[in-house]
Amino acid sequence: MIEIRNLEENEYEFLLDMLYESIHIPENKPTREALLNLPHIRKYHENWGREGDQVLIAIDEENQKVGAVWYRLFEENNQGYGYVDQNTPELGIAVVENGRGKGIGTLLMNKIMQLAMAEGYNSISLSVDPDNNDAVHIYNKLGFQEYGISGTSITMVYRGSKH
């Protein structure tokens, strides 16, 4: 049984681990420290805990952290790769390698989408490498639709029901 809960303050390093994992670089991936400190990546975690930041983590039966999903709001003058507008949080997700293929990612996605809608957002976006076929397939299945291209990534958006 997988438990989904909020990230605790002392678990911030796990969020950074998962952010690093979420960046799809199949070959010659830089170290965690080098990659997460690049300006276009640092914006995803710098000053974490500001208004609009949310993170959920998955815990397995052995009380191990096995995945995380998070979102953050960006602005027109400081866009993320999956930027749609300043009222659409951009999400990221990662599952530890030995936890993949077990439905943990789908569970996390469903929970964060419910949370975003409960917090009053009408949409949520993400950025995905088009070569990451498994992820693209899951996002399509969850109701995300292609929105545009940013660099080498596809921006996808999920639009919840209007209240």
Image (tube, rainbow, N blue to C red):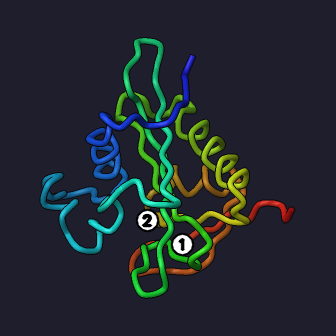
Split into 4 quadrants, where in the image is the C terminus?
bottom right
- Location of mark 1 (residue): 155
Residue at figure coordinates x 42%, y 29% from the top left: 99
The residue furthest right is: 163
What amino acid does circle 2 point to? Asp
Q: Find residue 84 and report its horizontal and vertical position in percent.
A: 58, 78
44 relative to 100 in the view: left or right:
left
Residue at figure coordinates x 54%, y 72% from the top left: 155
Q: Which mark is residue 129?
A: 2
User: If you read the primary sequence from the N terminus, does the residue marked by circle 1 or circle 2 appear first?
Assistant: 2
Residue at figure coordinates x 62%, y 63% from the top left: 124
Q: Which mark is residue 15?
A: none
Q: Are marks 1 and 2 in contact (CB under 8 Å)?
A: no
Q: Find residue 91 and report its horizontal and vertical position in percent.
A: 51, 58
The image shows residue 139, relative to residue 157, as above or below, that is above
What amino acid does circle 1 point to? Thr
Residue at figure coordinates x 40%, y 54% from the top left: 49
135 relative to 107 in the view: left or right:
left
Using the image as rendered, state which of residue 59 and residue 119 is in the foreground: 119
In this rendering, which labeled residue sits more in front, label 1 or label 2? Answer: 1
Q: Find residue 19 and report its horizontal and vertical position in percent.
A: 34, 51
Label 2: which secondary element: loop
Using the image as rendered, state which of residue 4 and residue 136 is in the foreground: 4
Q: Find residue 20 and report its horizontal and vertical position in percent.
A: 28, 51
Using the image as rendered, state which of residue 131 and residue 84 is in the foreground: 84
